Image: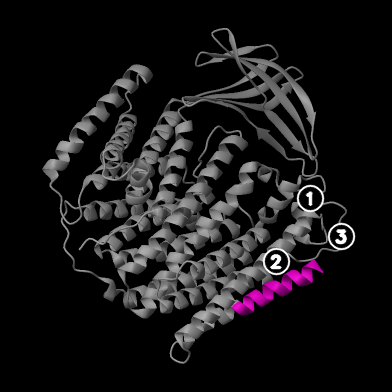
Amino acid sequence: MITEIGNFFLSISATFSLCLFSLIFFKKTVEVNTRIYFCKILSFSITFLILIAFSLLSYAFLNDDFSLRYVANNSNISLENIYKFSAVWGAHEGSILLWVFVLSLWCSSIILFSKNMSKIIIIDMLSVMGILLLFFLLFILFSSNPFDRIFPVPLNGNDLNPLLQDPGLIIHPPMLYLGYVGTSVPFVFAIAVLLNGKIQLEWLAWLRKWVISSWMFLTIGITLGSWWAYHELGWGGWWFWDPVENASFMPWLAITALMHSIIVSEKRGIFISWSILLAILTFSLSLLGTFLVRSGILVSVHAFANDPERGLYILTFLTLIIGSSLYLYFLKSRFLVSEKYYSVTSKEFILLLNNLFLTVTTFAILLGTLYPLITSSLNLGKISVGAPYFNFIFAALTLPIVLLMSPAIYTRWKETNYNLLIKRLGPILIFSIIISYVYLHFYYKTDTFIVYLAMSLAFFTILSSLLKFKQVIINGNGKNIFNRVFKGNSTIMANLLSHIGIGFLIIGITISNYYSIQKEIVMYKNSEITIKNVSIKFVDVQNKLSKNYTSQVGIFDAYLNNKYLISFFPEKRTYNVQKNIMTEAAISSTLFRDIYVALGEKISSDSWVVRIYYKPYIQLLWIGAILMILGGMFGILGRNKLVK
């Protein structure tokens, strides 16, 4: 019965989505309050019905209902319950159902948190949401149905992809989807504004919180994915410029630009046309990411599908959405242009430069991601665009953004006295350069210019932000520091925390990339290897039996100055059903370094290939991401005031 009930609720949801979309055509014939009432009923009903369908699929997984093809292909009797539940979104069909469920949640959230918004705009937003929901529901029903039956019913399933049997993958996809799908809110807002031919700055204040929320969830999702790759894949890295990684990173860059642009639009009433365009482009990049992951044209550990027909369906919708949205923008965006004055010395101009660099970076990554596909489709040969291209492009285009962060904090709206700005920031910049030179020259003995540059800019960003924190929060006006942090200056706190986080992120990336030590050797039992003053002894390998896999667990003891430090227990797991072999690294972390041990191939009864990494300051990468996420939380709380 699960098949019939699941399909019934999805079909009713699709019908209600069509009704929701149709409300856009009754502007002149149906009164506003009546339309908003139906919007509420339909939106909540769609969310409730999709929730039931999602719950039914979860129930099928938890109860090993292998009569469903999707459950049989992605679960197993011996799988732990927590992974049975996460298997709901572990492959293509379930991930699309999760996508549409999250989309329905955002749709209902618009209703719940829009009391002070124009009813006409909200109706149009929800109507556009209706067509998005309709597309994905039809896609599920006719192309990617997780409720399809299989006959004969197998006694056991094929098991969940071992790569996904990790705690990081329980949280990573939902967080990423909340961010991905959250870009639909600024998109439908942009379409509603263009359709109505008017905008108010108060609406931008409302939209800003939605944009920051989506940015925050995307940041959490990408961070969790990087953390998972670092701990699970055994390569010792956290980012590989995988095409599907790029597919999530490009919307993040675009929504970061949108977030800064909306701040200017809300404060000064300028860049509104640009903000609307960025809203369209950001959601378009999210749809493009969906196409890349599910079309089968990319080979990746992240890819969910390899069915070209599904890819064609998404590509058709992607083309219609992008084409019609851009046509509407170029047709009606003239009324959004503002002629307000601002100087090249103003905060507005710096944020405009920030937007340009972020946008160019986004499209440079897009070009590198799609170029091999384009050349292959044109029979020009198979060309690979690898990490060197992306690293060069990213460094060249983002370091100027980092340089602009400190002036952006200290400059004023409309116009700034640059002499005072130089007096304030000049000493901090010089001090940052000196710190970087002394530390890198004497500790790492490096002469690499890009390392000096990146570290100097990171210190410059952190120190200038801390100085601003001291001025505004520590020495600022207010009854107590709690009120200054959480009430009067939450927007400033958002900026400072995010910028400090980016500074830490840059330090972690730069030092760990350039000064990590990697050793891949054959180790015999009781042999030792020294890496950065830490001696690591290979003790033994023992067999371990778990519920759905067997593993060989290495035992390594680490010593510092002949004193016992810690033991490492890396694993090589062989999963019972699919026979996949997975590497589980063992990591010892402090604030200043990670020691990373991974067990490789078995050479003989007492010798193994072992990969050992010493990664300095990589923890700053995760700390920086956490600070950025905290900054996003403060940004949601913050209030902007109009600058006339």
Q: Circle 3 sits on which residue?
A: 153
Q: Is residue 27 above or below residue 11?
A: below
Q: Amino acid at mark 1?
A: Asn
Residue at image coords 61%, 78%:
16
Q: Is residue 66 above or below residue 29?
A: above
Q: Amino acid at mark 3?
A: Val
Mark 1 and mark 2 residues within 8 Å of each other at the beta carbon: no
User: Distance of mark 1 from mark 3, alpha carbons?
Assistant: 12 Å
Could you say where residue 205 lies in the image, as x and y percent from the top left? 35, 63
Q: Is residue 340 above or below residue 305?
A: below
Residue 457 lies in the magenta-colored region: no
Q: Amino acid at mark 2?
A: Ala
Q: Circle 1 sits on which residue?
A: 158
User: Distance of mark 1 from mark 2, alpha carbons?
Assistant: 23 Å
Q: Secondary structure at mark 2?
A: helix
The span shown in magenta is: 1-16
Q: Secondary structure at mark 1?
A: loop
Left or right for 59, reference 136: right
Q: Circle 2 sits on which residue?
A: 53
User: Distance of mark 2 from mark 3, alpha carbons?
Assistant: 21 Å
- Quarter of the rendering occupied by the C terminus: bottom left
Residue at image coords 70%, 43%:
162
Could you say where residue 484 lies in the image, as x and y percent from the top left? 33, 45
Mark earlier in primary sequence (2, 3): 2
Residue at image coords 51%, 58%:
180
The chief SS type of the magenta part is helix
